[in-house]
Amino acid sequence: MAKEVSPGVLALRKVVDDVYADARKAKAEGKLVGWSSSKFPCELAEAFDLNVMYPENQAAGIAAQRDGEIMCQAAEDLGFDNDICGYARISLAYAAGKRASRKIDFETGEFVIDPNSGKPLKDENGNIVIDEATGKPKKDPKTMKPYIVLDDIHEIEALPEGREKELRLNAIQPYKQMRIPQPDFVLCCNNICNCMTKWYENIARMCNIPLIMIDVPYNNTVEVNDDYVTYIRAQFDNAIKDLEKLTGKKFDEKKFEEACKHANRTAQNWLKVCDYLQYKPAPMSGFDLFNHMADVVTARGKSAAADAFELLEKDLDKNIKEGTSTLPFPEQYRVMFEGIPCWPKLPNLFKPLKKNGVNVTAVVYAPAFGFVYNNYDEMVKAYCKAPNSVCIEQGVDWREGICRDNKVDGVLVHYNRSCKPWSGYMAEMQRRFTRDLGIPCAGFDGDQADPRNFNEAQYETRVQGLVEAMEANKK
Amino acid sequence: MSIYTMGIDVGSTASKCVILKDGKHIIAKSLVSVGTGTSGPSRAIAEVLENADMVREEMDFVLATGYGRNSLEGLADMQMSELSCHAKGASFLFPNVRTVIDIGGQDVKVIEIENGMMKNFVMNDKCAAGTGRFLDVMARVLEVRVEDLGMLGDESTKEVGISSTCTVFAESEVISQLAVGTDKRDIINGIHKSVAARVVGLCHRVGVRDQVVMTGGVAQNHGIVKALASQLQHEIHTSPLTQYNGALGAALFAFQKANK
Ligand code: SF4
C-alpha cells in the first residue's frame, strides 16, 4: 500500500531535488559548483549566485540508500581510519572519485542481479509464493537488485569514448546523491565540528581546489561574547573577499539581504513545523523531521524552502483539525530522539518504536537550526550556535526546553560511533535529563552511516526497557 | 485454586526457567547452559515442567525475557525486557533493593529501582569488556574453569593490573603476563578488578543507592562481587538464586498478568 504524501512533503522533496539538479546543470554549463558544510553561512554563497552541494546531506542519502558501507570501506582503503566520522569517510571517498556502481556483465551489457537480494513474492491474497523446485519462497523479481561494486569516475572519464565508458557511466547508482558534480571549491565552517576542518582540507588537497574556511571557536559560555563576534565577523569579511576572487564578481549586497530574508523565513517556518510536535497526540511522526532537515541544510537561503515549510504547516494544521496524523500507529509514548539516526538502518530503528507505540516528538535539530537574526552581528552569533559548538549548559537547556514543551516521557540516545563530539557528552547530558526532568533515558550504540556499528537486538532490548521504564514512571 | 506461572529467561549463553505458585512460591526451576538459537530454551522448558510434574497447559501465564525472548513467540504469552524482569526478581528477593547490577553473558546493566519498579537504567556499549563473555575468554586463556575463577582469585597475593578497555587487549595482556611467569591467581584477581572498574563506571551513571544487589550468573563469582563492593564502597547483596533472577522476575510479571 503506497503511503499518501502530503503537498507540503512533496514540495519539500522537490526543493532538495532542485538543488541537486541545478548543481548538475550548472556544472554542465561550465559554471562553478562548490561543496559546503551544513552550517557554513549559505547567505554568502547565495549572494554570489553559487551552486552549492552539501556533503553531509549527500552522505546521509548515500547511507540511507545502503551504500554507506562500500563508500566507508573505500575511504579506509585510501588510508582514512575507520574511527573517522562516516559522513566524512563517504564524502572523502566520493571526492577521490569513488562511486558505488551496479555490476555489469560486459558481454550482454546487463546488470548482474544478486540472487540474495529482493523480497518474497506474494500472491493476490498477500501469501508468500513458494518455489516448488526448491521449497523456498520465490523472490519478487521487481525487488531484486544488482550487485553493488566500487568504481572510479576518474578511471571511467579517462576511457576512450565507446561502449565500456557508456556502460560504466550508466552503471553508477542512479540516485541523486551518487551523481553530484565534483567540487570546484569548498566552503567549510567548523561550527559543526572539528572533524570538518580536516575533512575539507583533505578534499581541497585531493581535488586541488580552493578552501574557504570560517573558524568558529567552541563556546564556553551560553552567551556569545563580543570578542568572538569580532573574530568571526572578520572571517566572514575575509570569506567574502575570497569569494570575490573566486568568482571574479563583486559581493552583491542586495542578493545577500534577500538570502538573509529567506534564511530567516525558512528558520521561522521550520520552528513552526517543529512546534506541531507539542500537540498530544502529535499530528506527525517526529522522525519525519530528520528528512525535512535536508531542506534546512541545502536550501535554507532560498524562498522555495520557506514556502515549502509553509505548505507543510498547512498540512499539519489540517491534521490537527481532522484529528489525524502521519504517524502510522497510535501514539502511546513520546520520546526525544537524541542524535542523528542510523540512516542505513532506518527501518530497524523504526520497527520497535512502532511495535511499542513510541513517537519521536522532540529532536535537538529544532532549536539548533531554527535561528533567526536581525543584523550582521546577530547572524554571526547565530552561526556560533550549532549542536557541537555550544557548551553543555546551552546544549542541555535546548534539549530540556523541547522535552518540556513537547511533553516527552523518555529519551532515546543514539551513541553515534561516527560523531565523537555529539556522543561524547551524552552520558552527562543523560544524567541531567533524568535529574531535571525525572524521565528515564536509554542509550544505544550505532552509527549514522556505517551499518557495521549497529546491533538490532541490543537496540530492541534498550527500546523495550525504556518503554517499560516509561510505563512504570507513569504509574 | 492456585495460579501457576512460568518465567523463561533466554540469555545469550544460558536458558533458565522458573515456575511460581501464586506469585510467591518457587516450585521448580531449570537451567541449561546454552542460550538463544539452540535447543536450550525448549530443553529448559521441558525440564522445569518435569521438575514440577506439570504440563504447559497447566500454566496460567508464560512470560519470556532475555536476549532471545522474541524467538519464543507462540510458546510464551508475552515478552518483556530482561531489564524489568531483573528489577522485579531482585525486588522479590530483596524488598529494599534500590540498585541492581546484572552482569550477563554479553551485557551489563545497572538498574535504578523505586518502589519495586524500574525507574531508569544504563547498559554497556557494544563492547564486551566487563561482561560474562569477557570472563569466559579469560578463563580459556588461563586454562581454568570459569566457575573456579572466584576461588582462585581469592588466593592472590600480588597486585597485577589488567586493562579494562578491551577484551582483545586484555587477552593479550593476560598472555604476556603468563609468558613472564606471573601467578595465575594474581592475574585472575587483576581480571576481577578490571571487570569491576568497567561496571563501576556504569553504576555511577545511574547513581548507587543502598541496597545494592547483584544478579546474573557472574554474581556467583565472589571475586567480582568483592572487587565491585570495594570499588563502589557499598555492600553488595547476592542470592543463591542469582542465576534465576531474570526468570523469576518474568514469572512474577506473569503472575500479575494472570491475575488481571
Ligand atoms: S558533527 Fe559529527 S556527524 Fe557531523 S560531521 Fe562532525 S563528526 Fe560527523
Image (tube, coloured by chain):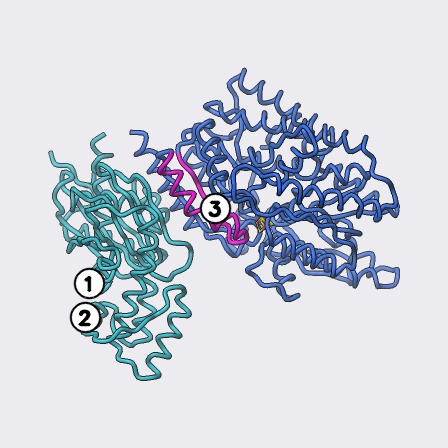
Residue located beneath label 2 in the image: B154
Does residue B39 appear to the left or right of B229 in the view shown? right
Badge 2 or badge 1: first in the primary sequence: 2
Q: Taking A153 as reference, is A459 left or right?
A: left
Three-letter amino acid code at disc 2?
Answer: Asp
The answer to which image quadrant residue A229 occupies is top right
Q: Colour of chain A?
A: blue
Foreground of the two, A127 or A409: A409
Residue topped by disc 3: A414
Instruction: Give percent across and percent down for residue A254.
Output: 81, 30
Chain (cyan) = B
Kindly state the secondary structure of the residue where label 3 is placed.
Answer: strand
Helix, strand or loop at mark 2: helix
Q: Is the Cβ of the residue at disc 3 closer than 8 Å to that at disc 1?
A: no
- Write down the chain letter for disc 1: B
The kind of residue tagged 3 is His
Q: Position of residue A382 (x, y in %)?
A: 62, 36
Q: Is mark 1 within 8 Å of ligand 1?
A: no
Picture residue at 65% right of the left edge, 30% below the top: A373
The answer as to whether the residues below labels 3 and 1 share one chain is: no
Residue span colored magenta: A410-436
